[in-house]
Image: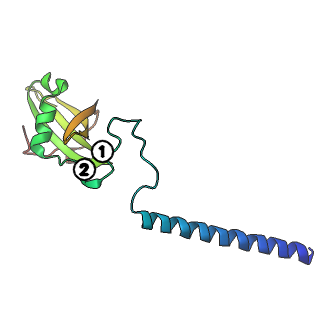
């Protein structure tokens, strides 16, 4: 192999490594300096495009609010028996709540409610029937 070919290969490799290091460090500085998303929020895609711009804009979800919202849902109103709550977790601005409807004969019908904050309150956007609920997700003694 000629010396010029070796030099070209080594120089190209060093330039690629230096370019990668430079790009990695500059993107880290942009993220740490901006503190917020650098992409503009498109308000035309949703009615409340700026609702989640500030982290403090999300309303708090209390257990009483969750219970009231779910009791007003048509699926909950059509169930007979009692209602038990499983785990409730917050993911990316939405609340996911596991709700079990226990009929008088002992049958359990679990549902997963997805709630989204809207105008200082919460709105049910999706309800899915769950076909399996681990026993660890059932909170004994929490009944409505």
Residue 3 lies, with reference to residue 96, above or below; the image says below
Question: Residue 140 versus residue 56: which sits nearer the camera?
Answer: 56
Question: Residue 92 versus residue 104: which sits nearer the camera?
Answer: 92
- Secondary structure, mark 2, is helix
Side of 10 where 35 appears, left or right: left
Residue 96 drawn at (x, y percent): 26, 42
Gap in angstroms between the C-alphas marked 2 and 1 = 7 Å
Circles 2, 1 touching at the beta carbon (< 8 Å): yes
Question: Residue 106 versus residue 95: which sits nearer the camera?
Answer: 95
- Secondary structure, mark 1, is loop
Which residue has dot 1 on it?
Answer: 51
Tell me the quarter of the image containing the N terminus. bottom right
Dot 2 or dot 1, earlier in sequence:
1
Residue 122 drawn at (x, y percent): 20, 39
Q: Work out which residue is located at the far right of the displayed protein and give it.
A: 2
Q: Residue drawn at (11%, 38%), measured in percent from left and top? A: 67
User: Could you say which disc has been placed on residue 83 in the image?
Assistant: none
Side of 1 where 77 appears, left or right: left
Quarter of the image holding residue 81? top left
Q: Residue drawn at (77%, 70%), measured in percent from left and top? A: 12
Which residue has dot 2 on it?
Answer: 57
Residue 52 drawn at (x, y percent): 31, 47
Residue 15 drawn at (x, y percent): 72, 71
Residue 119 lies, with reference to residue 33, above or below; the image says above
């Amino acid at each position: 192999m000629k010396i010029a070919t070796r030099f070209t290969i080594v120089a190209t490799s060093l330039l690629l490594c230096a370019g990668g290091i430079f790009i990695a460090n500059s993107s880290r500085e942009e993220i740490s300096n901006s503190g917020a998303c650098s992409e503009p929020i498109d308000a035309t895609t949703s009615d409340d495009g700026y609702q989640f711009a500030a982290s403090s804009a999300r309303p708090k979800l209390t257990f009483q609010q969750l219970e009231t919202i779910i009791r007003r849902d048509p699926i909950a109103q059509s169930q007979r028996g009692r209602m038990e709550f499983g785990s409730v977790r917050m993911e990316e601005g939405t609340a996911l709540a596991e709700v079990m409807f226990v009929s008088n004969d002992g049958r359990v019908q679990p549902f997963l409610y997805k709630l989204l904050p809207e105008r200082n309150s919460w709105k049910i956007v999706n309800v899915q029937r769950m076909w399996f609920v681990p026993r660890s997700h059932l909170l004994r003694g929490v009944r409505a």
